[in-house]
Amino acid sequence: MMYDFLVDLFGNSALANIIAGTIQSLLPLFVFILPFALFAVYLERKVSAHMQDRLGPMRTGWHGWKQTIADILKLIQKEDIVAKDNDRLLFNLAPIIVFAGSYAAFAAIPFTSIFIGTEVDLGIFYIIAVTGIVVAGILMAGWASNNKYSLLGSMRSVAQIISYEIPTILVALSLVMISGSMNLHTLSEQQTGYAWNWYIFGGPGSELSKFLLIPSMLVGFLIIYISTLAEVNRTPFDIPEAESELVSGYHTEYSGMKFAMFFLAEYANMFAVSAIVVALFLGGYQSPIGYLGDLIGAKWMIPIEQFSWFTIKGVFFVFVQMWLRWTLPRLRVDQLMAVSWKYLIPIAFVNLIIIGLITLL
Amino acid sequence: MKQAEEILQILKANFPDSNLELKTDQPTEPILVASPLEIDKLSMFLRDSSELLFDSLMNLSGVDEIKANLLSVYYHLESTKLKHKITLKVSTDRNKPEVSTVTEVWKGADWHEREAYDLFGIIFLNHPDLRRILMPYDWDAGYPLRKDYENPEFYQGMKVPY
Amino acid sequence: MSQESSLNTKSSAIRTEEMVLNMGPQHPSTHGVLRLELALEGEIITNVIPHIGYLHRCFEKHCEAMTYPQIVPYTDRMDYLAPMGNEFGYAIAMEKLLGIQVPERVDYIRVIMAELQRISSHLVALGTYGADIGAFTPFLYCFRDREKILSLFEMTCGARLLYNYIWVGGLSHDLHPDFVRKTREFIKEFRPNLKEVNDLLSHNRIFIDRTANVGILPVDTAINYGVSGPNLRGSGIKWDVRKEDPYSVYHKFDYDIPVGEGKYGTVGDSWDRYYVRVLEMEESCKIVEQALDQLPEGDVQSAIPKRIKPPIGHVYSRVENPRGDLGYFIISDGSTSPYRVKVRAPSFVSMQIMNELCKGYMVADVVTILGSIDIVLGEIDR
């Protein structure tokens, strides 16, 4: 949609295709991810501060809203330190790969019914696959840093992300079974109407099977939320960073902009996984209460409303992630594996079978 | 609960050859003076004898008695079961300061003895790991808590009295 | 397959190697400048060698050049989380050597200060323990309450961290007229806050999983090592200098000595050591309340000697500091400065059990165990 528009704008040529592609791929970065990361860092500070009986940044601007901008400026100016024994190539490449991995996931996330980076039919599959690249980046960072803490952190991280991908995939699979589609756009479209059409409440329709699905869907929702939490290394699963044990894990040796890349990737990832959870279970960009645009007959308003709903839902789950981070202690590495392999995966399997049987009805 | 006199009698009965002496001319607790090379056997007895049961070493401190040309070690013992206490003292020649270790008896003595070695240069015979503890491992200017200690001019090329 | 390649497969069985990890001296969870040399098999600990001395400030050597009253501010700097306790211990030892009887008001104020200090020190222990395990929020809740105690101290003697308040034979200042009221207010506010910390941290499932059955210290080993204070009581023995060897006016108060019970695991595990501290804060509140009720009138400086010149001799005296049994061994040669001062620092002794406790656990547990022992490097290195 948007791509065609841009191609027309630049005169239909090969060059126009490239320009249009570049613009479209950079759009989410500058319109959404960077502002979101800035906002999320600010939110994190304020949320943690208010949970801890303090105020957080207060001096730069009104309630410190300029604080993250100042931080980014500081990070840009910082000296980029590469130690003598670091593996230069991998060391420089790692933050880019990590960021690219989490950024690429945004391509298939449907923000509204009219804007979606690329509407791939294998949306869920694509996102899960592409976020897997992050693992390689983290391992590279840990290895290239030539630091034992970094190495331990990256090893833990890899083990953790791979383990927790399994329950995520199993739950996503159960949704694919119900909806019959891997396309996130289609999935969101199916959950149109009101909140009870969301998959967390059994999906659209009003047959018996919908009501039978509700408990399984709630279980599936919890599993996917817990495992995505682990995939983005947030508390209680932040053992790869574990600042009290491993100093700060795989990015111990990074400074300046490269550190900022990891930081940006972390916050982008937080939103990406929340977006997946929202798209799968909570109606994606669909409004739970109908659209104002429909009511007053202004069709052009609907995408804006959809975008707002999507962002609100996503940010809500980002907030929950922060909430958990500032409340819970962290697990030990073996306990973390136990949670995944002994609890989440078997439950997800059983859940998958139950959902399969219900859909057969 | 036993007084120092009774403890001395018990020890004398069990170690007839030892040179034990009770100094009571102190303003506070009396001190039991023992010989430095027998202190490990004595301690083992103090810990294990059912009448004494000194299961805890409260403190172990080295002291430099420069006027008498001696280095001494004070042991403050306590029994958590029988609730009595005793202070032991051993003195050794300043030029060849050797004392038997009590780490076998009370494991907590390990670091205390290392500290006494570090700061006074008292050699604890058979100590499992007699290294410096508070000072740098490569400190070679002597033992700082000795009364005749003087700061070295340089340490690792750095000026010491800066 | 040729002879050579079959040999090759044999020898190419994965070669593993012990990794040595230096934790510290600059590390977020070593509670100061401690260096732990960890030998690791994967993430499993095979050996721990603590290296101390980075904060060695020659307290004992300094003392030999100071007069007796000049030593008081130096004692503050040992266990910098509980300076009142350090001063208290020094004052008790010196009074024993000099044979001074202090006015009753002085004793009561000292006990109040020491118990408030115990609460504040345990709050730091709790908060940092939570932070070690990854829960950062309780840390700030604890520090909020600690600040209130420090304000009470500031009101009394003008300093928030290093007080120079308890002198040999007396105190530097009498209480501020508002002190009693504000302390009562503090205790009233503090009790619900303590419950909040308990709900947030102590009984949190993840916290229990991390600390229960980790770093179990049997009571015999603890006594053999000379471990004292909450670490010893966590192993399930009711041993407290305040009860066993009463000093000052502690015998006049009614309070309990909490011990570890192995509520979520084995007796003597990290959770027990932690929880003993939580319970002790409540007992300290009780003592402070009783002391405030009975606080007598009097002059706090009447017994301060003009010139301290103790008789030739030695004294060993100890008090129950927040970290355990703090002993002062002072030898006097009859002059105005001591011949020798040795401090038996509770953390110095407790630190030795690290190797015993950590073997076979994981890297993350080293932090758990170290936090549960609650060391202060200022006191270890002196």
Image (cartoon, grey):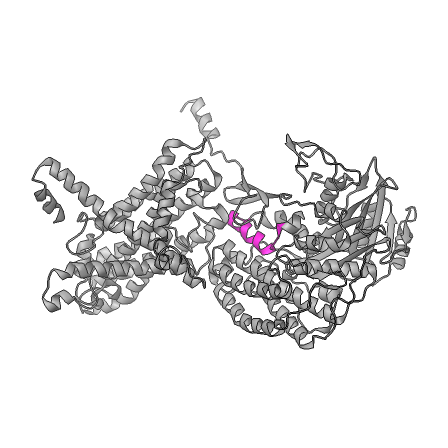
Residue B114 in picture, x, y percent from top left: 72, 42
Q: Is residue C101 visible?
A: yes
Task: Classify residue C310 as left or right of residue C113.
Answer: right
Please state the extent of the stretch shown in magenta in the rendering.
C361-377
Q: Is residue A209 visible?
A: no
Q: Quadrant of residue A356?
A: bottom left
**Residue at horizontal 14%, vertical 54%?**
A114
Q: Examine the rendered structure and indicate whether residue B94 appears above or below residue A352.
A: above
| Magenta: main secondary structure | helix
Q: Quadrant of residue C221?
A: bottom right
Task: Classify residue A16 as left or right of residue B43.
Answer: left
User: Which residue extends farthest bottom?
Assistant: C293
Task: Classify residue C188 as left or right of residue B107.
Answer: left
Residue A224 in picture, x, y percent from top left: 32, 57
Q: Quadrant of the C terminus of chain A?
A: bottom left
**Residue at horizontal 51%, vertical 50%?**
C364
**Residue at horizontal 81%, vertical 64%?**
C100
Q: Examine the rendered structure and indicate whether residue C296 appears above or below residue B71.
A: below
Tell me, yes or no, whether the highlighted magenta stretch contains residue C372: yes
The front one of C133 and C191 is C191
Tell me, yes or no, whether the highlighted magenta stretch contains residue A43: no
Residue C378 in picture, x, y percent from top left: 64, 50
Residue A278 in picture, x, y percent from top left: 26, 58
